[in-house]
Image (tube, grey):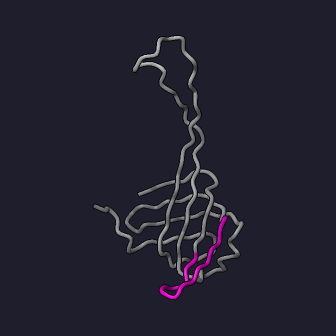
Amino acid sequence: MAAIHGKRGSASFTNLTFEMISFTIDATGETADATVMSSVTVTSATHWKTWVAGFKDWSATVECVEPAAGGGIAALGTSATLTLDTVAGYVYSGAAICTGFGPSLSTDSAAALSLTFQGNGQLTAAS
């Protein structure tokens, strides 16, 4: 059962105003193989790989109704704080660079705009 329903939400980046349809955040953590060879006899309890934690990374995609007030394409390549608010108490925020601008149009829905962002440092999550 969902804890948050997608009826309300807001997003902000520099001077853009979004009429948001949805947003997605993809946060990842790298790992590095730290396995060393062993002279121990192979058994079910030996020869397991070991890993160490590496760098963290995040990106986000915001789907909104076109046009995005404040310029849209003018945000491409700019850096600012991206804030994504579920309005249910969860707010995700961090410095980001706008890396994609993709308007779309079809005969069965309102014109839409997909904006992609590359995180530049820490993503915070607050409730």
Left or right position of 5 against 116: left
Q: Is residue 56 above or below residue 14?
A: above
Left or right position of 111 against 15: left
The image quadrant where one finds the N terminus is bottom left
Residue at figure coordinates x 42%, y 66% from the top left: 86
Q: Position of residue 96 (x, y in %)?
A: 63, 60
- Considering every residue shown, the one lying at the far front of the view is 42
Q: Quadrant of residue 35?
A: top right
Residue at figure coordinates x 53%, y 81% from the top left: 65
Residue 109 on the magenta segment:
yes
Depth check, front residue: 7 or 36? 36
Q: Which residues are magenta?
A: 99-113
Residue 104 on the magenta segment:
yes
The image quadrant where one finds the C terminus is bottom left
Q: Is residue 12 above or below residue 56?
A: below
Residue at figure coordinates x 53%, y 72% from the top left: 63
Residue at figure coordinates x 65%, y 72% from the top left: 101
Q: Position of residue 39 (x, y in %)?
A: 54, 11
Q: Position of residue 80 (x, y in %)?
A: 65, 64
- Considering every residue shown, the one lying at the far bottom of the view is 107
Left or right position of 63 against 126: right
Query: What main secondary structure does the magenta stretch of the protein show?
Result: strand
Q: Position of residue 4 (x, y in %)?
A: 34, 65
Depth check, front residue: 25 or 94? 25
Q: How many marks?
A: 0
- Considering every residue shown, the one lying at the far left of the view is 1
Q: Is residue 73 above or below residue 110?
A: above
Q: Is residue 35 above or below residue 26?
A: above
